[in-house]
Image (spheres, helix red, strand yellow):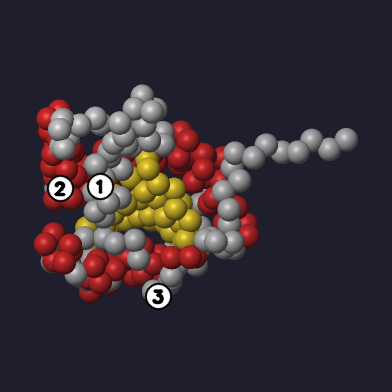
Amino acid sequence: MRELTPARVALGRAGASLPTRALLEFTLDHARARDAVHAAFDADSLLQGLANLGLRAERVSSLAPGRNDYLARPDLGRKLDPDSRQRLARCRDHGSAVAIIVGDGLSPAGVNAHAIGLLRKLLPLLAEDAIDVGHAVVATGARVALGDEIGDVLGARMTVMLIGERPGLSAADSLGVYLTYAPAVGTTDERRNCVSNIHGAGLSYDQAATTIGWLIREGLARELTGVGLKDESGVRAVVRF
């Protein structure tokens, strides 16, 4: 079991307590998770990475003025600050199918490490399906719902939000991707699809890109995301005779 999972199983015991090694490993992973939450968000490198991939990118911020405010007031991370909203409004493009949003979330470390690598795999798949990607956005102080306002302001049919997932004790740098068709302020979570656990020991970039690309293509074709759109990207076509 220990060889098959990073979860804490079969740790043993020393008297009534954990063995010293297990306790120290737990303490280290807990410290890594805390560090990931408070890591600096490398927005400049992400903007440059998006530009290198051929995407027009804009930097925006939520209403959360700092990291402590972001953690204490989740509601502030769901709304754009007025200046960001005005700048995005000038970028509105009614013709784009998809807006790419990269937000710090609860693990800036995960976004810094994996966002550009994943997009490098995903964008060619979207190009093969002739799916138009409009503006890209790098958002500081972002919660998932911030993508709804961003997509609405940009006029995108669907948002694809890459965001740092809440760090756990087995993965401090995990990336999640949320897809929302017809984004609008007030969208609820059952109308989203999520592909999560993207990191070195989790879902690979190739696997994640294949699933996300399928969900985007099918979501645009069916005009929905969420509970009505199940991931069938791994289902082989049935041969009929």
Mark 2 or 3: in front is 2
Mark 1 or 3: in front is 1
* Residue nearer the viewer, 210 or 51: 210
* Residue nearer the viewer, 130 or 12: 12
Assess whether mark 3 and mark 1 are in contact (beta carbons under 8 angstroms). Answer: no
When asked about the image quadrant of residue 184, the answer is bottom left
When asked about the image quadrant of residue 154, the answer is bottom left
> First in sequence: mark 1 or mark 2?
2
- Across and down, in percent, residue 81 comes to 22, 71
* Residue nearer the viewer, 150 or 206: 206
Q: Residue at x 79, y 35 (%)?
A: 239
* Label annotation for residue 55: none
On-image quarter of the N terminus: top left
Q: Would you say 144 lies left or right of 188 here?
A: left
Which element is circle 2 on? Answer: helix
* Label annotation for residue 186: 3
User: Badge 1 is on which residue?
Assistant: 167
Label 2 is placed on what type of residue? Arg
Label 1 is placed on what type of residue? Pro
Q: Would you say 32 lies left or right of 2 here?
A: left
User: Badge 2 is on which residue?
Assistant: 34
On the question of residue 141 being in view, the answer is yes
Q: Residue at x 62, y 57 (%)?
A: 221
